[in-house]
């Protein structure tokens, strides 16, 4: 079994490390691979789209032919986790900044996003979050973070902050405005792995 982390731009190594630690915790046999080019996504049982610069990420995904592979994987109900910029990339609709930069969003989650929801006010901060998946608070690390401003009826809202949705789930797709890979808390990665192993 392979779990792939999109590795063409953004915070890649931290996600790879967190996934490997989570796999060791559960004694599971799976390989975590970096996805840098076309042809790897179809082999993966789970895909992570990390933080980074969303405009660049969208452009490179399309140019490398990876965007269509991710859409195909989503249609096959392969679990996908998008964090920070990844939350923007997987959305159906963006704000005027997304339109201005002509970002080609994947559209695999029925959400509308604000690309710089927290960026201008507080470039980086941490907050204790109540997340429906977890039985105790999770420390969210926000770095120029986006937010979900609205979502379709098939989307389950998991957490809010300042009237914005910061965690949501639609089928096998999970979106987070924060960086779970930058904490020692592996509960969200374990939840994602639950999806992968039960798929």
Image (tube, rainbow, N blue to C red):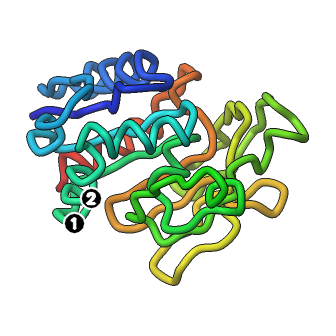
Q: Is residue 116 above or below residue 190?
A: below
Find residue 7 and report its horizontal and vertical position in percent: 35, 25
Question: Who's the residue at 68% across and 31% down the image?
Answer: 141
Q: Dot 1 lies on which element?
A: helix
Rounded to the nearest angstrom, the CA distance separating label 1 from label 2 is: 6 Å
- The front one of 48 and 197 is 48
The answer to whether 143 appears left or right of 108 in the picture is right
Q: Mark 1, mark 2: which one is toward the viewer? A: 2
Quick one: label 1, few (<14), some, or many (20+) residues within 10 Å? few
Find residue 73 and report its horizontal and vertical position in percent: 20, 55
Find residue 89 and report its horizontal and vertical position in percent: 48, 50
Question: Who's the residue at 64% across and 38% down the image?
Answer: 138
Judging by the rendered image, the residue that carries numbered circle 2 is: 71
Q: Quadrant of the N terminus?
A: top left
Location of residue 30 (image quadrant):
top left
Question: Who's the residue at 63% across and 55% down the image?
Answer: 98
Find residue 49 and report its horizontal and vertical position in percent: 40, 39
The answer to whether 73 appears left or right of 118 in the picture is left
């Amino acid at each position: 079994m392979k779990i792939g982390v999109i590795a063409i731009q953004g915070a890649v190594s931290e996600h790879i490390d967190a996934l490997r630690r989570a796999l060791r915790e559960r004694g599971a046999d799976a390989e975590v691979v970096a996805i840098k080019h076309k042809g790897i996504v179809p082999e993966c049982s789970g895909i992570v789209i990390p933080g980074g610069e969303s405009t660049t990420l969208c452009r490179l995904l399309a140019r490398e032919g990876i965007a269509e592979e991710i859409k195909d994987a989503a249609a096959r109900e392969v679990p996908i986790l998008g964090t920070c910029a990844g939350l923007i990339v997987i959305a159906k609709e963006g704000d005027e900044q997304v339109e201005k930069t002509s970002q080609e969003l994947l559209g695999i989650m029925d959400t509308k996003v604000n690309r710089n929801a927290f960026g201008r006010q507080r470039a980086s901060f941490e907050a204790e979050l109540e997340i429906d998946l977890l039985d105790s608070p999770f420390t969210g690390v926000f770095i120029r973070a986006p937010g979900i401003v609205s979502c379709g009826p098939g989307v389950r809202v998991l957490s809010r902050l300042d009237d914005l949705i910061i965690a949501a789930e639609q089928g096998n797709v999970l979106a987070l405005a924060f960086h779970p890979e930058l904490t020692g808390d592996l509960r969200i990665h374990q939840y994602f792995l639950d999806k992968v192993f039960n798929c």
